[in-house]
Image (cartoon, helix red, strand yellow):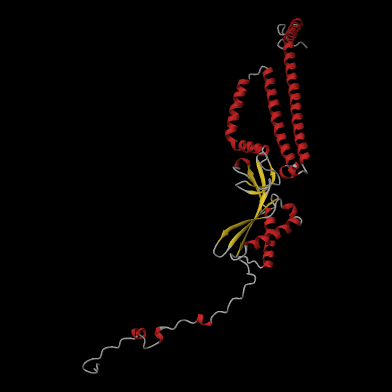
C-alpha cells in the first residue's frame, strides 16, 4: 500500500547528522572554554568564602572561650571570698555567679552576632553582590524597628546595666517605685517581684526610675518607747540595756544583731509623755523581726520594773477615787422659788377689769 505524499517526510525537514554533531561539538567547546577561562575566578571566590567562614568560626570560638574563662575566674574569686566577714557583708557567691552568667550570655550573644554578621557581609561582597541597596534597606528597617520597639530597646539596655552594676539580685527585697517586694527573677527585659501579700509583680526594667535595695549591707531596727514624763531616765536606760544584753546573747538574735542596741536618747518631750528612741544595726531584711522582739521584751521589762508606758495600764497606780454623787445633781434653779423675780417675770399677766362691772352679752 503506497503512503500518501503528505505523510512522507520531506528531505528539507530531515536533520543532517553531520550538522547535529557539529553544533554539539561547538557547544561543548564553548562550555569547556568558558570553564577554562573562569575556573580560576570561581576557585578564588570559593577559597575566599571558605577562608572567611573558617576565620569567623575560629574567631567566634576563641572569643566565646575567652568570655567563658573570664566568667569562671569571676566565680572562682567570689567563692574564695565566700565565708569571710567581707564575703558575708558584700559578696554572695551564688548571686555573683548568676550575675556573671547573665553578663557572659549577653556578651557571647553580642560577639556571635557581630562576627557572623560581618562574615556574611564579606561573603556577599566576595560573590560580587552590591551591598549598597542591602545596607540602605537594613538601615531603613533598623530605624523603623528602633522607633517601633524603642521601649523594648530601653528595657533591654536598662536590664543590661542593672545586671552589670549589681543593683539587685534574686532574693533581695527592693523598692522599685512602681512596686516593692522580694526579687524572684531578674531578666534583661522584666524584673519579677514577690509582693508582701504574695502577689507577683512584672516590672519592665525601662520603667524603673529609682531602686531602693533593702538587702544590701545592713539594716537599722528602730523602736520608739513612750513613757510618762515623770519616769527616771537613768532607770529607763538601765532597763533597756539589760534587755539589750539579754537579746544579744540569745539565738538567733545574736546572729541578726550586727551591732549593740543603743539608747539614742529623748526623741520627743510632750506635756503628757516623752519618747525614748532605741536603735540597733541588724542583718539585712531582719530589722522588722528585731524591732518586734525588742518591743516585746522592753514592755515586759518595764512592767516588771514598774515603769509606766503610755497606752497601757499604769503599773502601781492608785485606784480612781469614787465619783461624787452630788456631781450628778443639777444646781437649784431660780424658777423653783415662786417669790423670786425670775418666777414673777414668767407669771402670766391678768386681764384688765371693766369699769361698769360685769357685762352679760348674748
Which image quadrant for residue 264?
Answer: bottom right
Number of marks: 0
Q: Is residue 327 above or below residue 53?
A: below
Q: Position of residue 78 (x, y in %)?
A: 76, 39
Along the viewing direction, whichever of 105 and 333 lies nearer the viewer: 333
> In the picture shown, does residue 361 fall above or below 61?
below
- Drawn side of residue 211 relative to residue 335, left or right: right
Q: Which residue is at the far left? A: 356
Outermost front residue: 234
Residue 274 showing in the rendered view: yes
Residue 118 against residue 337 in the figure, above or below: above
Q: Quadrant of residue 239?
A: bottom right
Q: Is residue 90 above or below residue 270?
A: above
Viewer-proximal residue, 304 or 82? 304
Q: Quadrant of residue 68?
A: top right
Q: Describe residue 165's horizontal placement relative to residue 140 as left or right.
A: right
Residue 15 point in image, percent of width and height? 74, 8
Q: Determine if residue 8 is in view.
A: no
The residue at 58%/62% (across/down) is 274
Residue at image point 63% right, 20% down: 131
The location of residue 244, given as percent across then percent down, is: 70, 58
x and y percentages locating residue 345 in the rendered image: 33, 84
Please tell me which residue lies in front, 71 or 56. Answer: 71
- Residue at (72, 15) in percent of width and height: 45
Task: State which quarter of the image contains the C terminus.
Answer: bottom left
Q: Quadrant of the N terminus?
A: top right
Amino acid at each position: 500500500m503506497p503512503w500518501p505524499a503528505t505523510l512522507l517526510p520531506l528531505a528539507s525537514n530531515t536533520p543532517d547528522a553531520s550538522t547535529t554533531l557539529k553544533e554539539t561539538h561547538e557547544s561543548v567547546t564553548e562550555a569547556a572554554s568558558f570553564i577554562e577561562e573562569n575556573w580560576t575566578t570561581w576557585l578564588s571566590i570559593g577559597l575566599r568564602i571558605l577562608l572567611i567562614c573558617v576565620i569567623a568560626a575560629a574567631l567566634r570560638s576563641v572569643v566565646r572561650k575567652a568570655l567563658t574563662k573570664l566568667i569562671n575566674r569571676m566565680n572562682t574569686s567570689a567563692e574564695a571570698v565566700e565565708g569571710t566577714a567581707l564575703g558575708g557583708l558584700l559578696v554572695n557567691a551564688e548571686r555573683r555567679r548568676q550575675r556573671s552568667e547573665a553578663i557572659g550570655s549577653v556578651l557571647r550573644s553580642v560577639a556571635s552576632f557581630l562576627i557572623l554578621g560581618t562574615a556574611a557581609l564579606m561573603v556577599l561582597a566576595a560573590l560580587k553582590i552590591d551591598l549598597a541597596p542591602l545596607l540602605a534597606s537594613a538601615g531603613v528597617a533598623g530605624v523603623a524597628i528602633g522607633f517601633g520597639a524603642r521601649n523594648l530597646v530601653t528595657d533591654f539596655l536598662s536590664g543590661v546595666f542593672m545586671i552589670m552594676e549589681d543593683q539587685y539580685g534574686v532574693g533581695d527585697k527592693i523598692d522599685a517605685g512602681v512596686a516593692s517586694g522580694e526579687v524572684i527573677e531578674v531578666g534583661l527585659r522584666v524584673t519579677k517581684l514577690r509582693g508582701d501579700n504574695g502577689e507577683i509583680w512584672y516590672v519592665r526594667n525601662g520603667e524603673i526610675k529609682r531602686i531602693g535595695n533593702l538587702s544590701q549591707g545592713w539594716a537599722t531596727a528602730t523602736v520608739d518607747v513612750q513613757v510618762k514624763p515623770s519616769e527616771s531616765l537613768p532607770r529607763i536606760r538601765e532597763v533597756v540595756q539589760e534587755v539589750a544584753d539579754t537579746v544579744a546573747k540569745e539565738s538567733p538574735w545574736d546572729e541578726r544583731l550586727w551591732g549593740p542596741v543603743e539608747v539614742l536618747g529623748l526623741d520627743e518631750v510632750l506635756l503628757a509623755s516623752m519618747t525614748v528612741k532605741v536603735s540597733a544595726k541588724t542583718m539585712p531584711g531582719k530589722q522588722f523581726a528585731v524591732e518586734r522582739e525588742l518591743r516585746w521584751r522592753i514592755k515586759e521589762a518595764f512592767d516588771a520594773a514598774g515603769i509606766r508606758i503610755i497606752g497601757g495600764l499604769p503599773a502601781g497606780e492608785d485606784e480612781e477615787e469614787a465619783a461624787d454623787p452630788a456631781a450628778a445633781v443639777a444646781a437649784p434653779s431660780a424658777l423653783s422659788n415662786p417669790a423670786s423675780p425670775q418666777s414673777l417675770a414668767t407669771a402670766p399677766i391678768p386681764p384688765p377689769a371693766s369699769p361698769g362691772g360685769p357685762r352679760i352679752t348674748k
